[in-house]
Image (cartoon, rainbow, N blue to C red):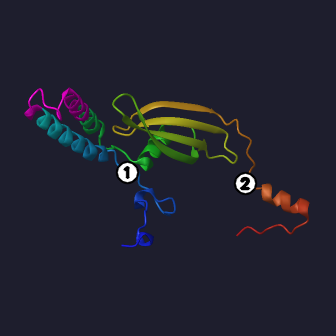
Amino acid sequence: MDDGEVRDALPEDLDRGFVGAYIFPDNRRRRTTGALYLGVGALVLGMSSAYAPDAVLANAGLTIGAVGLLLFGLYSVLAGRKFGLNENEALVAASKELGFAVGHASAQLGWRGLSSRPTWRILAYSAEDPPISRSLVLIDAIDGTTIDAYVEDNPEEWISTSNELDGLEREAGLPESEDV
């Protein structure tokens, strides 16, 4: 096979050029790698214990490495919990928590704590034009409980998108656009 024919490509779920609804990868994928770590760790531990204590190729370092693989595999299996709600359900839960109608909003997935518990971070703006309030809501991705909510007046300088263009067209001497 010619080197020119070999192409490296991103998986479909990581492609930036994808247009459409994005589905966050489920946290359960961690269990697959955890099972691999457990299997390799058990295999290496079994091999190291089968050799004599004074063997050259199997020493205490191999046993310590196998135990490390087993511990990390166990951690990966325990941290790979199934999501209880997706990003759309998290946005709905955040809007119920806030005291205003939500306009623009975005969801980001993060992890918290030693157990790597998945958490949705929802940034939401109020529905006014320009938005008066903004908030950050942390929603647990497993059971859907609200961890924390921060609401503040929007300190950003925004331009209004509804009537701003009409005023600019008048100043430039252009005919005003008709609403469709």
Residue 16 showing in the rendered view = yes
Q: How far across and down, in percent of the image, does residue 142 sit?
A: 34, 39
Residue 84 image position (x, y, % from top left): 33, 43
Query: Dividing the picture into quarters, in which one does residue 10 lie?
Result: bottom left
Give the secondary structure at mark 2: loop
Inspect the image, locate mark 2, and give the three-letter code of the amino acid beneath it. Answer: Thr
Q: Quadrant of the N terminus?
A: bottom left
Instruction: Classify 10 Å Cα crowding around label 1: few (below 14), some (14-19), many (20 and above).
Output: few
Marks 2 and 1, how far apart at CA:
35 Å
Q: Is residue 36 above or below residue 4?
A: above
Mark 1, residue position = 25
Question: Is 172 placed left or right of 147 in the picture?
Answer: right
Residue 158 point in image, percent of width and height: 73, 45
37 drawn magenta? no
Residue at image position (85%, 62%) is 169
Magenta span: 49-70
Q: Secondary structure at mark 1?
A: loop
Q: Nearer the viewer, residue 59 or 63?
A: 59
How many residues crowd mark 2 within 10 Å: few (<14), some (14–19), many (20+)? few
Q: Residue at x 24, y 32 (%)?
A: 65
Left or right: where 15 falls relative to 168: left
Looking at the image, is mark 2 or mark 1 earlier in the sequence?
Answer: 1
Question: Residue 161: which disc?
Answer: 2
